[in-house]
Amino acid sequence: MKLTLAEPRLLKDTISILNELVNDVQIKIDNDKIEIVATDPANVVLVVFKLLSSAFIEYQIDSPEKISVSLDNLNQILRRLKGNDTLSLEVDRKKNKLIVKMSGDSTRTFNLSLIDMDEREQHIPELEFKSKVVTNSKMLEDAIEDVGIVAESAALILNKDKMSIKGAGNLSNAHIEFPKSDDVQIKTDDNIEAKYSIEYLKKLIKGGKLSDEVTIQWNNDYPLKLEYNLVDKLALSFVLAPRISED
Amino acid sequence: MKLTLAEPRLLKDTISILNELVNDVQIKIDNDKIEIVATDPANVVLVVFKLLSSAFIEYQIDSPEKISVSLDNLNQILRRLKGNDTLSLEVDRKKNKLIVKMSGDSTRTFNLSLIDMDEREQHIPELEFKSKVVTNSKMLEDAIEDVGIVAESAALILNKDKMSIKGAGNLSNAHIEFPKSDDVQIKTDDNIEAKYSIEYLKKLIKGGKLSDEVTIQWNNDYPLKLEYNLVDKLALSFVLAPRISED
Amino acid sequence: MKLTLAEPRLLKDTISILNELVNDVQIKIDNDKIEIVATDPANVVLVVFKLLSSAFIEYQIDSPEKISVSLDNLNQILRRLKGNDTLSLEVDRKKNKLIVKMSGDSTRTFNLSLIDMDEREQHIPELEFKSKVVTNSKMLEDAIEDVGIVAESAALILNKDKMSIKGAGNLSNAHIEFPKSDDVQIKTDDNIEAKYSIEYLKKLIKGGKLSDEVTIQWNNDYPLKLEYNLVDKLALSFVLAPRISED
């Protein structure tokens, strides 16, 4: 197996985002893609990450592989990537290592020990959404950060004309409105509303590093799905459990 | 009441400076200006801040208002302002809130609870100064930071030809000289000298964010007055109690 | 004595590097140079720094001087240097002070107390090296930082064709290769290898701030010598004791 990535930041930025959520992960490598499916320890968020073979300049595999690594360690290694480096990945089954090679002015090789993990397949729940918003990922990020100033959870509210994000704390409350526009595409039949943890949202919105556009899907007191995609390159999606309102 | 500010940094930067000195403040809004007069908890420094109605693009008030807010909370909210935002302020007496609205790519609204404060009027002492220095605020900032390396208090010394700032610690001492020049306008009849706390001075000199020029007035063992003004926009002044020298 | 330096960063950056290694130092000033020879408290690294008289725009001394100062205090003072400042140094024997004067928009003077130190001469060991690598100091810095991700010590390995830097931790290992090239000049008769502490190496490689080129000399289980030179200006060299491998 030999995989070479010309834009290593696609992997570097994703691993840095996942590392805020998950500890150890299983990485599946097949003919089409590298895939990570993982949940955080509290089981509140599910991550599905696909880095497509078409994102690579070299993508040779003999047979599908499954390897498990510590995200902390992988992240520390990938943070050493510099601007012009290309990144290549190999699995050395004999030494039980993932070989991470960075080539730029010099060639730097890191061998990361594979770890043992339960082989249980992550269950990806089937979700049905009737509503969808496609918008600028930076605008979503700002709104979540804004609400995070005053509250610990954010209500995402949608009607035909606008999406609103609201939060309330002891002393202050905040709301941000996204009226329907070319930059805020809204598709919904009903008025919907659900609350989600700001702490988790703040981690998920970092997906904006990867894609300028985010697709937001949710429903009344129902999980939230955020998708960050780069055509022919990668797909990163998060499913976040709602906070059921107590009132 | 509806106030709209095209240069929100005038308020944002000031509140960030005041927040280092004061906790809760009363804000007076009348036909001409927004005004904050406050002292720090230790009663060592008095702040007088005026943001003139001419700094606003919209300035409508029905009758003068007095509101009190937590500076910590107001500061956290104003830090969310982005480069191109305009800022509008309203008071909602029914809900007992200050409504802070930021309009840019999206419209973000924060409602901050008003708090109860003693209505006692801050006393602004009448001070008489016979000496005055007008200089570059960055040069004053550097000098205070320099002396802060070696000492906990700074002596401000003035004669007809120059201003000096001096400090002495256990191992080192420092002095900075400002000879009279086009950039250092000096007006004094006497030689004067007084000492002030570096810890406080370091907070006050941040007024240089607002204005490139600072007016410095003091006298022998007498309070120090620093003024940062922007014509037709704002006036920020500090009165700092002296440290009476023990020797 | 009066010394004036047009490029104060030569002294500022060096003192900042030495301050990570040594506490108090003796500074020798003679007709040709300012010299500091010091070892760290654990006696693992020896530093020899020479700032040549030709680096100064004014270099007047009456007779050779030896003074001792706290590096912490000197470093704090020199950090206050700004881009265009010139730096002048004088010794005031009566007041027992080193006078550090920074001249730019204003003139700022720091007087640093001289301290008493054992007058014992630092012994500079005579070392014989048969191997030498001259390379880009940034490349060495990156390699040490890379290995520092996974290990606490780095092995420096040399043969006629390449230099390698290797490190191994519990979960991962890393190696960086520098094949012989115009940028990597290698001179050696034997294959050599020795291990050194990453913690110390990370401090020494900051010499790259001063010079783009580093000369590396070592031998099997033998001290390492790093040299950063600027022709006619300065010479900074470190001798680092090896970690004798236990296996």
Image (spheres, coloured by chain):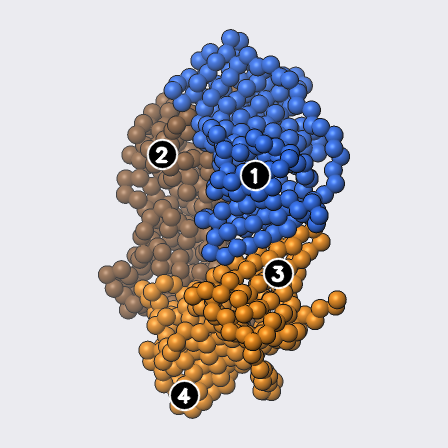
Chain colours: A blue, B brown, C orange
The chain ID associated with circle 1 is: A
Mark 3 and mark 2: Cα distance apart in space: 50 Å
Whether labels 3 and 2 belong to a single chain: the reply is no
Q: Which residue is mark 2?
A: B84
Disc sitting over residue C166 in the figure: 3
**At x 55% / y 45%, what residue is drawn?**
A88
Q: Is residue A191 above or below residue C209?
A: above
Other-residue count near label 4 (Cα within 10 Å), few / some / many at <14 / 14–19 / ≥20 = some
Q: Residue furthest bottom?
A: C63
- Residue C165, above or below A48: below
Q: Amino acid at mark 3?
A: Lys
What residue appears at the point 38 percent right and 23 percent down from the top-left corner? B1
Q: Position of residue A22 (x, y in %)?
A: 66, 37
Kindly indicate whether the residue at mark 2 contacts the one at mark 3 (C-beta within 8 angstroms).
no
Amino acid type for the residue under numbered disc 2: Asn
Q: Nearer the viewer, mark 3 or mark 1?
A: 1
